[in-house]
Image (spheres, grey):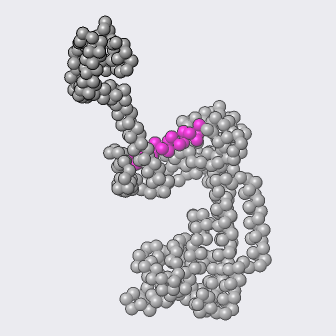
Amino acid sequence: MFREKTKQYPWLICQNKKLGCLTCQKIKAVGPNVGGSQVHIADEWSKVKVTAYGATRAAQLQSLRKKIHKHRMSDYHQAAEKTMETAKEKRMETLTSDMQRDHFLTTDRVFRTVYKIVKSARPFTDLPTDIDLQVMNGLDMGRTLHSDYSCATISRHIGSEMRKRVVGKVLQSGTKCSVLIDESTTDSKKSVLIIYIRASLGMSEEPLTFFLDLVELSATNADGIYQALMNNLSQHGFSEAIMKERFVCFASDGASVMLGSKSSVATKLVEKFPNVMVWHCMNHRLELSVGDAVEEIAGMNDFQFFFDKIYSLYHASAKNRRELTECCEDLALQCLNIGRILSTRWVASSYRTIKAVWQQYPALHKHFSDASVDPKRRSTERCMFSGLANRLSNATFVHNLGVMYDALEELSEFSLSLQDRNMTLPKAEASLSRQIRVLKSMAEQPGPRAEETQTAGDLKLFKGVPLTNNSRYSREINH
């Protein structure tokens, strides 16, 4: 009879013709506070002491059914079952795991936000604002790592880990590598060495150029730069044995401390690694070539002086910049930044300045003309603007502007192609050969901008501005 009831109710147990509750027995064994809830356990059910009453079998079964039903529906039995179910879920362990997962998730979101800030070249002070925005959008960003100091620390950590992975792939791949360095100066006037590595991340992949490190120099002579370079390479895993096996090329600018024939960084590297090929950066070669050509071209000094003058005019005065912007708006032109030309910057920077003057030529002439008759300005300023307007409207200057536009446009495209991370020597040689052919053809026949300015000189009108002929303002550049 007792065994029949245990088959019908699995939570019943039978011992010596007595019934008990398996659930209550387990709760009694582990304690009444399992799962954080207080449970009162009946001793007769937890200690298997429930018996049947009655003289006949039917009476005993009826007695057992009443007791079982009463116990099953009792509050303490149901509470015991809920407690056992809660214990099976292991809520404490799950709660700890959920807390760790949430913490990792919020930290991951902060790290991605910092990576976006660094990738976009934004200041570290953007992090608190970006965090507040994401919180307003409903994301949980945690309570820590929200300051600009944390942003700087996280960015250094991300950069360090990315560098370790890239360097590790280079070392594991076993491919050859090249080192590119350049010396620079920080805003705090400290001399630093910029180190790049060009290598392949796999045997079947194309080589890539990636930034390795920025090293502060204690000495800017050849010995100091050489020691700083070798120490930094060793710190990143490029040991002397690896360098002897894989180091194939060293590239830098044409400074004597870098590529000098007697005592330079290149000579010291060749002494230690005899198979290394020393290469002068082609972009620096291009800039040196342009500089040498400019010195031999008649009329370039006056042309460059005019651009330096308008650069200082708009760079140093917010008033002049605002007035030029207003003139551009009146003529429905885009106001572009005017910089220096043929200075220490890349030739592409000179091209952008020439292009800016070309596109906003009417606005410049309008500003110079208006300022030359402005009674609020001093007489010296009015005379200066009058001279600038006369020089700008000179047919010879306009012709020189067209010639330089054509030349610098071609050189700018060539310079930018050489700066491509995927550029190789065969590609560079083909691009250089093409550029030589283009420049030779432009020497025989003027380019499109030069032809346009020649036509404007014949018509005495360029972009709506009347032109004059006055040899005292400029010398014509022979295209």
Q: Quadrant of residue 163?
A: top right
Position in image of residue 461 (x %, y %): 62, 91
Image quadrant holding the C terminus, namely bottom right
Is 132 located above or below residue 380 in the figure?
above
Asked if residue 375 lies left or right of residue 51, the reply is right
Is 247 located above or below residue 423 in the figure?
above
Task: Residue at 44% x, 57% y: name it.
Answer: 122
Which region is colored magenta? 149-168
Position in image of residue 27 (x %, y %): 28, 20
Task: Residue at 37% x, 53% y: name it.
Answer: 138
Position in image of residue 332 (x %, y %): 51, 83
Is 318 located above or below residue 423 in the figure?
below
Along the viewing direction, whichever of 370 and 109 lies nearer the viewer: 109
Q: Is residue 262 visible?
A: no
Is 114 located above or below residue 237 in the figure?
below
Q: Is residue 150 magenta?
A: yes
Judged by its main secondary structure, the magenta piece is: helix
Q: Is residue 236 visible?
A: yes
Image quadrant holding the N terminus, namely top left
Q: Is residue 199 magenta?
A: no
